[in-house]
Amino acid sequence: MELIPRITEKSYSEETKHTYVFRVPAGASKQAIAKAVVDEFKVTVEDVRTLTRRGKKTRFSRGKHAYPGTTYRQDKHLAYVTIKEGEKIPVFDDASEQSEEESNSSRKSTTASGDSKGRQTTKKKSSKEEKGDKK
């Protein structure tokens, strides 16, 4: 079974309650989800809550003169998995560490080649220097 972690603000706030949010296949049962989490992350599952989010309604056109129709996006099946206190799932920690490292490295690169406010600076050649380069 494929468990896709949901990395959102809400999932991070749920993490304080030892609850992790995953996107799971539509036909997955709570028992199958709990077994998949135990097998993949080696943690103790205490509770599993599931929900199905209906897909949004979208409009589409079938050509220049045809009447536009409506269809629905795919439904999403989510699972809120509560694990035993003191245990963690490293998938969520890795994502937050990577984003912090990327933001820190981008800050360092802009301040190294820019001014004090992080703006890029370039020197303009004077008209005399440009004429000298052409000769």
Image: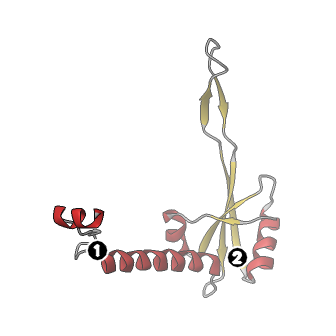
Residue 23 placement: quadrant: bottom right
- Badge 2 marks a residue whose secondary structure is strand
Q: Say left or right for 64 vs 113.
A: right
Taking 43 as reference, is 11 left or right? left
Amino acid carrying mark 1 in the image:
Gly
Tell me residue 90's x, y (percent). Answer: 63, 81
Q: Residues within 10 Å of mark 1 (few under 14, many from 20)?
A: some
Q: Which residue is mark 2?
A: 46
Q: Position of residue 32 (x, y in %)?
A: 82, 66
> Of the numbered discs in the image, which one, if any, rests on residue 114?
1
Answer yes or no: do the residues labelled 2 and 1 have beta carbons within 8 Å?
no
**Residue 118 placement (x, y as % from top left):** 28, 72
In-image side of 135 versus 20 (left or right):
left
Vertical relation: 49 (above or below) 89: above
Closest to the observer, 55 or 103 = 103
Residue drawn at (65%, 14%) of the image: 66
In the image, farthest residue toward the top: 65
Residue 127's disc number? none
Quarter of the image holding residue 109?
bottom left
Distance from disc 2 to disc 1, alpha carbons, whole Å, reads: 51 Å
User: In the picture, which quadrant includes the N terminus?
Assistant: bottom right
Q: Looking at the image, can residue 89 be seen?
A: no
Give me the residue at 52% from left, 70% from top. Answer: 12
Mark 2 against mark 1, which lies toward the viewer?
A: 1
Q: Nearer the viewer, residue 46 or 56?
A: 56
